[in-house]
Image (spheres, rainbow, N blue to C red):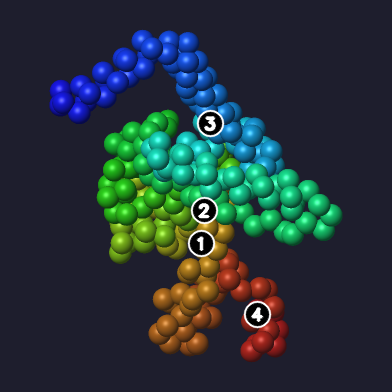
């Protein structure tokens, strides 16, 4: 121990021995202030208190009904660490002032939300970023790999707390995955992620392209393809390959052989535009 430290401890001992009553009062006051400060920080950090000043009733209600209802607002919306917590509390005093001086008056200005998006470190306080499989299995999601590629947890899980609707509505949407899994940035094969599904056997038939229209009457296509309502339009807004070579000369015999194939795209009066009669 340095001489300076020894000298300071000696002065404190001397002060306490010579002023015990005053020293005890100071110790009690410091302890009481510490307890009060801790209690105040805990109370003002509760979602109920946040709601009392931040105009956030919809967000509060969705949080209350979510699986994160035991997690406080600041646990997600604030970077981890006591310094960040204390800094935010100082900044938030402005919200308290505005709540009691501006927003409770007639014709109050419109409130613009300025919520902080949760950072990955905040999620990592409770969740392991090494998870490979989704809950329930069947879906391969290497979280660490996604994080290493620069993705945020909220890229996929944006609605897990403040989503509207049932639990299914809060799950990541397929179109979110397909923003990267487009075959260029990341693989787009079904079995890369869907370990239990993969490509259905029916889709592996050599003539699937020709028969899928008829098969769609008995197969529930939406079980996989409901993630994008315009899925079919990728092909059905383009001319089939059969229409590319001498189709004007050959379409009559093809129509006689399989008229239902024509009706998949064309209305019954389509032929009348050229033939004048319904064939």
Give the left or right position of residue 174, taking residue 189 as reference: right
Q: Secondary structure at mark 1?
A: loop
Of the 4 image quadrants, the one containing the C terminus is bottom right
The residue that appears at 64% across and 34% down in the rendered structure is 49
Q: CA distance from mark 4 to mark 2?
A: 32 Å
Which mark sits nearer the N-terminus, 2 or 3?
3
Q: CA distance from mark 3 to mark 1?
A: 51 Å
Q: Secondary structure at mark 2?
A: loop
Nearer to us of marks 4 and 3 is 3
Q: Are marks 1 and 4 in contact (CB under 8 Å)?
A: no
Which mark sits nearer the N-terminus, 4 or 2?
2
Residue occupied by mark 2: 227
Residue occupied by mark 4: 270
Image coordinates for residue 40, horizontal then vertical, percent: 57, 29
What's the mark number on residue 41?
Answer: 3
Q: CA distance from mark 2 to mark 3?
A: 44 Å
Q: Secondary structure at mark 4?
A: loop
Residue 32 seen in the current view: yes
Nearer to us of marks 4 and 2 is 2
Nearer to us of marks 3 and 1 is 3
Q: Are marks 1 and 2 in contact (CB under 8 Å)?
A: yes
Q: To which quarter of the image does residue 278 belong?
A: bottom right
Which mark sits nearer the N-terminus, 3 or 1?
3
Nearer to us of marks 2 and 3 is 3
> Is residue 146 or residue 258 the one in the foreground?
146
What's the mark number on residue 12?
Answer: none
> Is residue 122 or residue 20 the one in the foreground?
20
What's the mark number on residue 231?
Answer: 1
């Amino acid at each position: 121990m340095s001489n300076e430290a020894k000298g300071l401890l000696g002065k404190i001992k001397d002060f306490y021995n010579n002023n015990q009553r005053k020293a005890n009062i100071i110790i009690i006051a410091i302890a009481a202030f510490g307890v009060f400060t801790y209690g105040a920080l805990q109370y003002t950090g509760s979602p109920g208190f946040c709601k009392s000043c931040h105009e956030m009733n919809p967000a509060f209600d969705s949080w209350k009904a979510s699986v994160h209802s035991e997690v406080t607002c600041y646990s997600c919306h604030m970077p981890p660490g006591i310094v960040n917590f204390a800094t935010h509390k100082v900044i938030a005093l402005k919200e308290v002032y505005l709540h009691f001086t501006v927003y409770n008056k007639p014709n109050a200005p419109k409130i613009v939300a300025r919520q902080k998006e949760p950072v990955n470190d905040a999620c990592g306080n409770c969740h392991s970023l090494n998870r490979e499989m989704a809950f329930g299995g069947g879906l391969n999601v290497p979280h660490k790999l996604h994080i290493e590629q620069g993705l945020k947890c909220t890229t996929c899980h944006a609605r897990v707390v403040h989503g509207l609707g049932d639990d299914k509505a809060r799950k990541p949407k397929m179109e979110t995955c397909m923003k990267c899994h487009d075959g260029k940035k990341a693989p787009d094969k079904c079995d890369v992620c869907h370990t239990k599904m993969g490509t259905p056997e029916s889709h592996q038939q050599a003539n699937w392209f020709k028969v899928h229209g008829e098969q769609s009457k008995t197969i529930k296509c939406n079980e996989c393809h409901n993630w994008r309502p315009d899925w079919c339009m990728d092909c059905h807004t383009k001319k089939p390959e059969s229409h590319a070579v001498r189709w004007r000369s050959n379409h009559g015999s093809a129509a006689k052989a399989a008229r239902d194939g024509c009706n998949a795209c064309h209305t019954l009066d389509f032929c009348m535009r050229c033939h004048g009669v319904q064939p």
